[in-house]
Image (cartoon, rainbow, N blue to C red):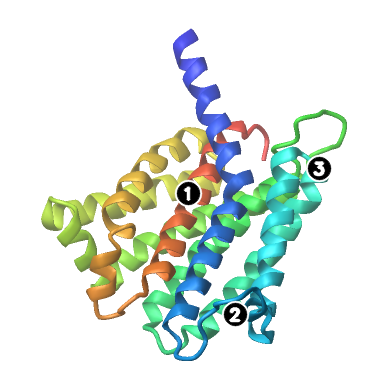
Amino acid sequence: MAVLDRVLRVLDALGLFLITRFPFIELFVLLMSTGEEAENLPGARTLTFRDTLRREYLLVYINALIFFVCGTGMTLDLKRRKCGLAAALHVVVYTGVTLYQLKKSSEYLIVRMAARSAAVCGGYLFVAAGLTDSQRGQAKVFQALKVSRQILAFYLFCNAYMVWASEEDRLAHIKNIPGGQFMIVMVIALYVIPALSIYAGYEAGYFARIVVWHLVVVSALVDFNTKYWHRSSSHVAFWVQIQHAARNLAVIGSLLLLGRKRYW
């Protein structure tokens, strides 16, 4: 039992680490994708510091600043709740702008990215509601915690639906994970069963840890296979796919924090 308790504490600490540091990952991906776009645009290469001060980079700097401030605040526990709320709101706006730029992409890609962004937003709401507070004194906002938990359950339902309904998603799983059609059934079941339990609040922490391992495997073999997605019918750009895949890290962190669930 002592070993199990130690493992659970490590997983809880890992969840806290992932969700509070994730804005820095978003910041890194944003800067790298912007740099790649600048290199590929004719006549838009940045050779001097003055080249980086163009008006078209203003939105990039604003998003980068928000990522940095929210990540720093949540990491150092400086106004952590407010930073969590700001990060959640920023995810909504930032994803909206990103999806508008990808409006010519397939509907399933847009739905997939929107659902995962909603799950990241749910994780930040855990922080905003006080689940990750290091000091006692402030009451937790249980209604917000419940909404966050149900958002994560919705994301798992959406993943199951996408594997079942989207030929592109189903083919990606078949080509990258051995097992054929039986594997597809198992993938869908490992999404739906934990999603039902998490949504109902029944043994949410236990089923969340089960689906965490499932997400780790799917992310490593499917989502982070950038070459496959670039060659697929969606032709997803490298850094767009990296951003989409990396957001599962925040979702994994949020699911690990569900082990703190008591009465919500």
Q: What residue sits 37% from the left and 51% below the top?
A: 191
- In terms of depth relative to the viewer, which is nearer, 62 or 111? 62
- Are the residues tagged 2 and 3 within 8 Å (C-beta)? no
Q: Three-letter amino acid code at disc 1? A: Leu
- The quarter of the picture where residue 55 lies is bottom right
Q: Where is residue 21 in the image (x, y as percent from the top left)?
A: 61, 46
Mark 3 falls on what kind of element? loop
| Image position of 153 with respect to 89: above or below | above
- The quarter of the picture where residue 60 lies is bottom right
The residue wearing badge 2 is: 97
- In terms of depth relative to the viewer, which is nearer, 96 or 257? 96
Q: Position of residue 46 (x, y in %)?
A: 55, 78
What is the crowding at mark 3: few (fewer than 14 residues within 10 Å), some, or many (at least 20)?
Answer: few
Which of disc 1 and disc 2 is earlier in sequence? Answer: 2
Q: What residue sits 74% from the left and 49% below the top?
A: 128
The residue wearing badge 1 is: 249
Q: Where is residue 204 in the image (x, y as percent from the top left)?
A: 52, 38
| CA–CA distance in space, label 1 to label 3 | 23 Å
Q: Three-letter amino acid code at disc 2? A: Val
On the question of residue 1 being in view, the answer is no
The residue wearing badge 3 is: 78
| CA–CA distance in space, label 2 to label 1 | 21 Å
| Quadrant location, the C terminus | top right
Q: What residue sits 81% from the left and 42% below the top?
A: 78
| Image position of 119 with respect to 18: above or below | below
Which of disc 3 and disc 2 is earlier in sequence? Answer: 3
Q: Three-letter amino acid code at disc 3? A: Leu
What is the crowding at mark 2: few (fewer than 14 residues within 10 Å), some, or many (at least 20)?
Answer: few
